[in-house]
Image: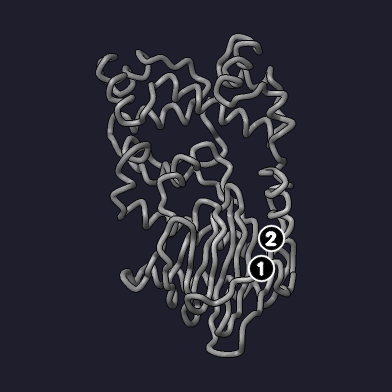
Amino acid sequence: MPDERAPWPSAADPLGEALHFLELRGAFYCRSEFTAPFGLELPPLKDHLWFHVITRGSCWLDAPGAQPRRLTGSELALVPHGQGHRLRSEPGAPTPSIFELERERLGERYEILRHGGGGERIDMVCGAVRSDHPAAGRLLALLPQILVLDPATDPARLDWIQSTLRLMAIEAEGLRPGGETVITRLSDVLVVQALRAWLENDPAARSGWLGALRDPLIGRAISLIHREPGRHWTVASLADQIPMSRSAFAARFTELVGEAAISYVTRWRMHLAATALRDEGATVAELASRFGYRSEAAFARAFKRVVGSPPGAARRTLPAPSQQTGSISTTYSSTSTATG
């Protein structure tokens, strides 16, 4: 059956196809009011994207594997691989852990941080979001260690960043019912807009899986697999849908995607199955039927081959959605426990 969780973008919109899979979940939001000199270290958060927006002044961002970057007013920076990193007013400024600093907690996912030596004012909006969709990893793995969007080069983007931040500020000041949810959703919008800009402009977005999505033939085949993961797909049936010859389709798919078409079908199904085990409490019998397997045993064998453990063991080790959000302290604690 087609995936009906959300409206699909047009098959002619490969960038929309990629962004559709993000399904971001806001985990943490912080309004930061700094004065120079200041510095702090933010923790690694597995499977999260950190974002920072400078609303006043400037500061330095230092992340592993990337050159330190000076951020100025209205620039939006992503640290997309969950890495720990540092923010500071100037190179060499001490960077205590954020857990050593006093923070005003206003909700499960919203805090205010005030820190610094009393000099020049630097205001920021900071936060972390995560995506659990199986395709998200393919997209995020292509991103650089630090991704910075400078709206000054694009007045339209400057306008939407400022408009989004104004809405976040209004919600933060009033903290009306549902305000925390609105703030985290607006954070998601900031991240998606930054990723959209990267997808549109960076040459890296034209290779690998994203490049395959852009291909008018193979991109259509990938979309069909995504929409109907339970259909009995074969190389021949996929080639017929394009249409291409079976041999030409198989060779082109492997060349662009990096794996054979049927291997991709199986991997896609098993990632969706892992998500269903966690989020829906689905049974093995239900998943076998949903993804077109004739028996529970056949499904379980495919699941173990792709995921590395049987469905029952995976269900016990996958964190529940309720464990994937919360204050930065809660999120970091659960992540540290999970990663060792």
- Decide if residue 71 is on the left or right side of residue 35: left
Any mark on residue 98, and which?
Answer: 1
Q: Is residue 39 left or right of residue 245?
A: right
- Look at mark 2 in the image and give the residue it sits on: 328
Neighbourhood count class around disc 1 (C-alpha, 10 Å): few under 14, some 14–19, many 20 upward? some
Label 2 close to label 1 by CB (< 8 Å): yes
Q: Give the residue drawn at x 53%, y 88%.
A: 120
Residue 185 position, x and y percent, is: 59, 59
Nearer the observer: mark 2 or 1; the answer is: 1
- The percent position of residue 338, horizontal first and vertical second, equals 69, 43
Secondary element under disc 2, as helix, strand or loop, is helix
Q: Quadrant location of the C terminus?
A: top right
How many labels sit on residues?
Answer: 2
* Image x and y of residue 184, in percent: 61, 61
- Residue 14 found in image quarter: top left
- Residue at the image position 67 percent from the left and 21 percent from the top: 310
Q: Which amino acid, by three-letter code, is at mark 2?
A: Ile
